[in-house]
Image (cartoon, rainbow, N blue to C red):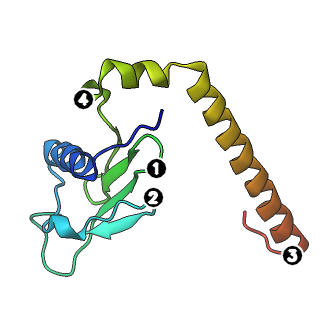
Amino acid sequence: MQISFSYDDIRKQVLNFMTSLEIQPYDERELIFDGEIHRYRIHNEKRGHTSGAICIHTDGWPAGFVMDWRKGVKELWKYDASRLGQDQLTYFNSDEFKKKCAEQEKKANEQRKKKAGKSFRNGENNL
């Protein structure tokens, strides 16, 4: 079973979360959900200031963080599962899903090991 999340629903949930923390963006079109950290202008900031930061990934289970470095606010966010149907929730508790997650984690660890080995051989010190 493949679970797909609505991008619009993810966006609404993140914006509601940011509003509850009083760190909503000046222009919500600035927000990018690609798993990378992006800076943004908070709703009451002067032009040119970007004290907000956001990192939201939408692959797998949508999650990430939002922050305002001036206020010292950093909060984790994850997709609200209450919107999913019972069949979808059952899938996330299944052995099939757990096996798929374990395989993906193993693959990611192997890629990290290769990258670390390559950096070490090239004399890079990333500490």
Can you say which quadrant of the picture contains the C terminus? bottom right
Residue located beneath label 2 in the image: 35
Amino acid on which the number 4 mark rests in the picture = Arg
Q: Secondary structure at mark 3?
A: loop
Q: Residue at x 77, y 64 (%)?
A: 115
Q: CA distance from mark 4 to mark 2?
A: 22 Å
Q: Is residue 76 left or right of residue 109?
A: left
Is 56 drawn above or below residue 44 in the view shown? Answer: above
Mark 1 closeness class: few <14, some 14–19, many ≥20 residues within 10 Å: few
Which comes before the other along the chain, label 3 or label 4? Answer: 4
How many tags in the picture? 4
Q: Earlier in the sequence, mark 4 or mark 2?
A: 2
Could you tell me residue 108's position as x and y percent? Answer: 69, 49
25 shown above or below 7: below
- Please name the residue that numbered disc 4 is placed on: 83
Identify the residue position indicated by label 1 in the image.
59
User: Is there CB contact under 8 Å for labels 3 and 4?
Assistant: no
> N-terminal of the two: label 1 or label 3?
1
The residue drawn where x is 73% and y is 42% is 106
Residue 123's label in the rendered image is 3
Q: CA distance from mark 1 to mark 3?
A: 33 Å
